[in-house]
Image (cartoon, grey):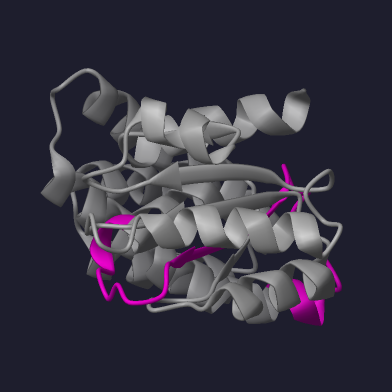
Amino acid sequence: MSDELFAKLTNSLVDGDPDAAASLTREGLVAGLEPMAIIRQGLMPGMDIVGQKFSDGEYFLPDLIIAAEGMKMAMELLEPELRARQQTLETAGVVVIGTVKGDIHEIGKSLVATMLSANGFTVYDLGVDVPKEAFIAKIKETGANILGMSALLTTTMTQQREVIKALEEAGLRAQVKVMVGGAPVTKGWAEEIGADDYAEDAMGAVQKAKKLVSQ
């Protein structure tokens, strides 16, 4: 019963059916399956397959967004159950992420946040139009070891530099690896402003984040 449900759950993400992912997660909980098993044996394998298909050029951004939505809906059902059991996923790292001040672009940043969560990171998504003070406060509060900043406009890219300066002034720069991304952002820009890495897309961000925390 459980193996069959896990396989269906994996396929719901691969097939891009968020409602089925939520329904099967609910079904698993009612049947008494462990929330952690649902995540590790059903959801995470599904996101791994979707991520690989995206990397291989078989899936595209809409496929990734739909799978991420299914993962998010399932996790919203599972997180209260994990808390009730006083269980936590072993975290790969703690990430604070947001779109910088003056920029209200949401989709790419949210996709990166969801994919990081699906790959075992604890993620605090501050949303869009985030001032540098909010990034600093959240890093202090959570002890985050990764900061992700998105900027989709050439006019807001400079805010990424300002946040890195604020990290230095707050004495936090040594604690936090900084990743930047967004349409106008390049590897050269990341190097110029003193960021630790740059990612073109959500799967790239996951791979870079794993690399940064292992250093």
Q: Where is residue 88 in the image (x, y as percent from the top left)?
A: 79, 62
Extent of the magenta region? 82-108
Which residue is drawn at the image coordinates 25% and 69% (left, top)?
A: 105
In the rendering, at what x and y percent does residue 186 appear? 32, 32
- For the question of whether residue 63 can be seen, the reply is yes
- Total labels drawn: 0
Residue 163 drawn above or below residue 135:
above
Task: Give the quadrant of the C terminus.
Answer: top right
* Residue 1 can be seen in this image: no
The picture quadrant where one finds residue 111 is: bottom left
Residue 171, compared with residue 133, is above or below; it is above
In the rendered structure, does residue 98 fall within the stretch colored magenta?
A: yes
Check the image and name the residue furthest to the top.
Answer: 56
The residue at the point 57 percent across, 38 percent down is 195
Residue 2 placement, left or right of 165: left
Percent x, y for residue 120?
63, 46
Q: In this view, does 109 lie to the left or right of 106?
A: right
Q: Does the magenta stretch include residue 179?
A: no
User: In percent of the image, x 31 and y 41: which residue is there?
Assistant: 185
Query: Residue at point 52% right, 77% down?
Result: 77
In this rendering, the answer to whether 128 lies above or below 123 is below
